[in-house]
Image (spheres, coloured by chain):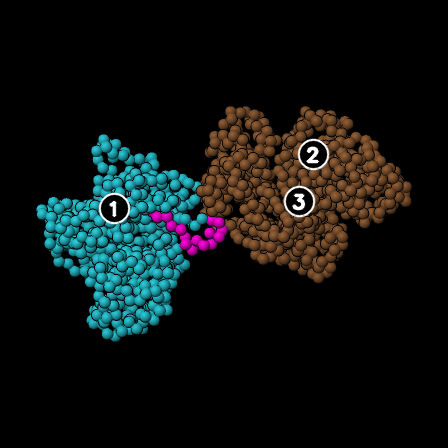
Chain colours: A cyan, B brown
Amino acid sequence: MAKNHKAEPIGGPPSDVEHLKKESNYLRGSLTDSLSNRITGGLPELDNRLLKFHGSYMQDDRDYRNEREKQKLEPYFQFMLRVVTPGGLSTPAQWLVMDELAEKYGTGSIRLTTRQAFQLHGVLKWNLKKTIQEINTALLTTLAACGDVSRNVMCNPNPYQSEIHSEVYYWSQQLTTHLAPKTPAYHEIWLDGEKVVDSLEQNGGTVEVEPIYGPVYLPRKFKIGIAVPPSNDVDVYSQDLGFIAIVEDGKLAGFNVTVGGGMGMTHGDTATYPQLAKLIGFVTPDRILDVAEKTVTIQRDYGNRSIRKNARFKYTIDRHGLDWFVDELHDRLGWELAPAREFTFEHTGDRYGWIKGKDGRWNLTLYVESGRIADTEGYPLKTALREIAKMHTGDFRLTANQNLMIANVTSQKKSKIVALLKGYGIAEGTQYSALRRSALSCVALPTCGLAMAEAERYLPTLIEKLEPILEEAGLRDEEINIRMTGCPNGCARPALGEIAFIGKSPGKYNMYMGAGFSGDRLSKLYRENIGEDEIIDTLKPIIDRYAAERDSGEHFGDFVVRTGYVQVVTDGTNFHA
Amino acid sequence: MQLQVTNSPFTSEQAELINKLLPTLTETQKNWLSGYLAFYRAGEEAAAVAVPEAGAVSVVELEALAAQASAASQGPRDATILFGSQTGNSQRLAGRLADKLKGQGFEVTLSAMNQYKTNNLKKAGYLFVLVSTHGEGDPPDNALTFYEFLHSKRAPKLDGTKFSVLALGDTSYEFFCKTGQDFDARLTELGAERIADRVDCDVDFEDAAAGWIAAVTGVLLAAAAPASAPQAAVIAADSLAAVQGESVYTRANPFMAEVLENLNLNGRGSDRETRHLELSLEGSGLSYEPGDAVGVYPQNDPALVDDIIAFLQWNPEDAVVTGKAGETSSLREALLHHYEITVLTKPLLEKAVAFSGSAKLAELVKPENKDSLRAYVSGRDVLDLLRDFEPWTLGSGDLANVLRKLPPRLYSIASSLNSHPDEVHLTIRKVEYEAHGRERKGVCSVYASERLEPGDKLPIFIQQNPNFKPPVNPDTPVIMVGPGTGVAPFRAFLEDREELGAAGKAWLLYGDRHFVTDFLYQTDWQRMLNDGVLTKLDVAFSRDTEEKVYVQQRMLENGRELYKWLEEGAHVYVCGDEKHMAHDVQAALLDIIGQHGGKSPEGAAAYLTELQEQGRYQRDVY
């Protein structure tokens, strides 16, 4: 195959993190020593960087930071543990383990992430190992939940087309496993007693420890998601590598492939921007592992290892061009992708309530505010789900919108689950305003070290203030995707929110509008650095006008673009324009 | 006991006068009187001197009399003064006695009991013992070996020895002054002759101790040869200030220190509260060394004071006597600042009987009911007493005769004067608990945590503690065991070593309940570790794991290294809880010495005793 587009990797002096990875001896570093140091509940910066590859971040409760400093106490260091659940799927037994670990070692609650993973917060250093061991005993892992590797592979939980869910889910699992780091360090550090023989020794030193990644792994995190139209719940265009399931005659024909999406940016740095992935072709299911692996190796070889802010795959593609990438991919594959096939996305949100699948089993999608599974006053959600898990014979699926699906339920069990939910007073979500049901937020304060403002703790309050305005305008049941993050790294995919807020400083946000309802267009900055009063004053007239002047079926994001509140963003490269 | 013609050498007129006088005397007055009589006799023998009014005579004047008397006396001129001291009080008093006798030209041997060569004991003509009692009647650390020696079969006959004992203690403990009483009895048993009655001092010991010193000095001078030293030296030597350094501020005249900082060292969510107080010493002339303590005069809980006054239906503005010179203040002020109201003691109950119409109380104080009495006073306060034994005939004017003076609380200093000039830092854990259906509050700790603000003034004095001092040689390694607030003096030690650039290794062992909230001074230690001031830090948090872990476990885990440090000459310091921690730590030390030094239990004990005698094993436990 002729190479039309040649490219040289960008080069430049490797960043500190690159040195660290190189010297870490395949993610070992001095983690074992640092973990056993009793004088601090934290880790040195270098080991914390490595710890991410093992599925955990060091954080500190920022609510306590100032007072503890005065008290001559170090910050309240604690660890977030992220559990890899490809496609968000777990068994009732696994649910019960997470439920128990949250009580035993965490803050008591479980966070469902926007990437369909479980998160525990508040785990102390001394409990990390025990927690990780118990997670692994439940046949789950934290390996590669964070770090410069391919992350938890997302997948539509698919209540409508239940017959292809298991197939799509299978591929999300295969992708996760295929791209997982192969270093024995994880087993050595966390699962002692179950040491895996070093592959180098086993193979007489001839086989790479990390055949896909090599010793320095990727330049930056790498995200993969699989969408099943008409739902774009996984926000496939926000993924580094996306697959769009093509179903023909009720059968999974294969996947359209998208590349180069990503949300993160840095305030004030226009060289960083959110970008949507581009469609490059179609593959049959049996070839997607090959496509994923080769895509990852291209990013491995061409990604920016000098400046981390520009290291995501989207910048690699924008730097060298999509044509270069497709050529390079074809070159590495030794074959070419087929032309992309037809599909239509209609929305990104979840459908709440009970839905019967084509296999006759029931699926319940339950609204979970901010993805937080906790018992709160008058709303014992965590207890209710524990009781359901004890009798449930199907599975649990975390959705890309931080909600929970109790899936694969027989009619007989359905009535029991309905009774349990009723007994605990747990609502499916349909009674909430459509705005609230369509809301996404990241964790932010107090635990996230990156947060500049509140998100999870504040968005419900803001929505409460917006609801009367929507009610008055007759828009109570109009779905508008509203998203909030504490920083521009974009965990709640704000650049794809029809209304979005990105934290700037405590109580202050940049406000964005105009993203496509089905996740196919980026939003645009509308107001900078505004607080709650200004947010409400700004939004009220727009909402009122939207109610009065919208076209039939016109979504809010489309309306604000059509009426000129914001310019259309045709590509991430003109996001800041 | 009533004096009669038949059981005393007095005439009936004399006996009547004495019988009339004696029951009216306070403890202090009795002590004074006994000392005074000694001087009086000495004075009579020496020369005819004017006899001042008994009520007006001061210790200083008595000593002046004694000095005059000594000019004409004859007899041996050497004295051995042995002290056993935990917080330094006995040692300080022993020093005062020594100065006094030296000023009179005596040959004085002054020694901590464990430093004293016991084979000299037989040769000691005059032997003075000053010793405190701790916990369950235990001798202080530096008295232990001597105590055991004297009570063993190896103790020599002391037929020619003349002695007297000053015992320090606290009447709120069951075994009040037991160690001093034991010495007194044992010395008699060994054939020694008591030349002045033992005096048992309560926490407010100054007056009683001064009386004893005056008494024994008097006896000695009366029996001794003419002095060569000038009289003036005796009087000058008595200045309390002279004992405590240059400052005019003393236990008797505390400095009003401004509170610069008062913060809680326990993080949010802790079930404990530990205050870090920073006090200003500016203008006080006070100075201190690592290992010293600060005495704090606290304020009683105003709520408790008001409850007591309300219960008795007294007028809070009544004037009551608060000082020995007859100073007065309002009743409320007196109860807030001058009298102890949170602790009951046997003497207090015995005095209170006279004012209670309760037959139950009269019954309780009978000697045969001493166990019931002990059980009753435990965990109860004055308000309980008042409520339990009505009716009362107590008037506010009787307070001075019933209540104990509010004693100062001692806290090991947590700062180095070198790194915080003109400041002193204290670490005070709040004590609160429930007993007998009421919430009980530690007087000083609750005062510090609830009612003391920056800018307030706190009456304090410096209490030197010569028995808890870092090694003189900065190259000597130190091992410091200080869980909980026991870590306070080690902050002082380490800050001082940092300022002095001490090169010796330093190893700190710390423990508490929870790592996250109870790691006192955590960032200080982390910085010191980084800077190399601290070589090694081991911690044990008992409530973070299913199995409780304490500092002694960490010692045992590091036993080999710890023994190596000992062999390199390390000093070991232990500070904190006596009842459990200090005992367990000592057991761990013995274990380690036995195991890693290849010694038998007896060998290990001898090794540790030797460390103690060399001043290489020091404790500040409470």
Q: CA distance from mark 3 to mark 2?
A: 19 Å
**Which residue sits at x=23%, y=74%?**
A549
Q: Is residue B621 above or below residue A513?
A: above
> Do labels 3 and 2 touch, CB within 8 Å?
no
The residue at the point 21 percent across, 70 percent down is A562
The image shows residue B222 at horizontal and vertical percentages of 82, 36
Q: Quadrant of residue A301?
A: top left
Q: Chain of mark 3?
A: B
**Residue B33: which quarter of the image?**
top right
Q: Amino acid at mark 2?
A: Leu
Residue receiving disc 3: B245
Q: Which residue is mark 1?
A: A218
Q: Magenta stretch?
A: A55-73
Q: Position of residue B569 (x, y in %)?
A: 54, 31
Residue A208 rendering spot, x and y as whole percentages:
22, 37
User: Residues at marks 2 and 1, common chain?
Assistant: no
Circle number at residue A310: none
**Of A84 and B266, the residue lying toward us:** B266
Residue ID for mark 2: B110
Residue B124 is situated, as x and y percent measured from the top left of the image, at 73, 29
Residue A418 against residue B31 in the figure, above or below: below
In the picture, the quarter occupied by the C terminus of chain A is bottom left
Tag 2's secondary structure?
strand
